[in-house]
Amino acid sequence: MTDLLLTRRSIKKYSSRMPSDEDIRKITEAGLYAPSAMNRQMAKIIIIKNKELRDEIAKANASIMNRDFDPFYNAPVIMLVIAKRDWPTARHDGALVIGNMLLKAHELGLGACWIHRADEEMKMPIGKKIMEKIGLEGDYEGIGHMALGYPDCEYPKAAPRLEDRIFYLD
């Protein structure tokens, strides 16, 4: 497990090859077993494999930054994590879900990258469209996305760890 923690990197270039449904199931299962406040398991995972919808989400995400690019680096799958907006630990719980999924994707030999701006998307028409497509009602906050696919690049080297980040109070 320590090796996974030390070697996982954000992948920013993907092939068009679609990950298997079995690998996606294993990744989502890892997310579902993330710790959550009071074990309430409030975070939800939305898997987007449909290319047309995936591209629409990418366009909306890029528009938040007023840029014309694919913020998901052409990954064929987007995994969107959401949670009820009024849940006090929504962001914390959802972040742990994404963290678990990033590690499981790496363990399976897939590339993944955490992508932000999910909450802004959920407030846009695309957010409403996603919610309608999955049949979920309520006020949900976008916690983050995970771009997922097979790397089409050299695996990045780790950046040096910054100093002065650990403090002991004995």
Image (cartoon, helix red, strand yellow):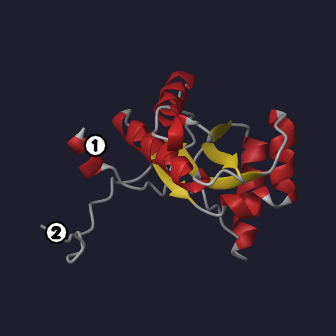
Is the C terminus in the top left, top right, bottom left or bottom right quadrant? bottom left
Q: Judging from the image, what secondary structure is the residue with disc 1 in?
A: helix
Q: On the image, numbered disc 1 is attached to which residue?
A: 4
Q: Is residue 16 left or right of residue 126?
A: left
Which label was assigned to residue 93?
Answer: none
Residue found at the very far left of the displayed protein: 170
Q: Judging from the image, what secondary structure is the residue with disc 2 in?
A: loop
* Percent position of residue 29, x then y: 50, 28
Q: Mark 1: give few (<14), some (14-19) or many (20+) Cα within 10 Å.
A: few
Q: Nearer the viewer, residue 91 or 21?
A: 91
* Percent position of residue 137, x then y: 85, 40
* Percent position of residue 77, x then y: 61, 41
Residue sitting at x 49%, y 33%: 27
Q: Specify which label sits upstream in the sequence, 2 or 1.
A: 1
Q: Quadrant of residue 62?
A: bottom right
Is the N terminus in the top left, top right, bottom left or bottom right quadrant? top left
The answer, for residue 139, to whether it is visible in the render is yes
Q: On the image, numbered disc 2 is attached to which residue?
A: 168
* Percent position of residue 113, x then y: 49, 53
Spatial separation of the CA atoms under disc 2 and disc 1:
26 Å
Q: Nearer the viewer, residue 165 or 129?
A: 165
Of the two numbered discs 2 and 1 in the rendering, the one whose residue sits closer to the viewer: 2
Q: Nearer the viewer, residue 129 or 67?
A: 129
Q: Taking 27 as reference, is 159 above or below it?
A: below
Q: Mark 2: give few (<14), some (14-19) or many (20+) Cα within 10 Å.
A: few
Q: Amino acid at mark 1?
A: Leu
Q: Amino acid at mark 2?
A: Tyr
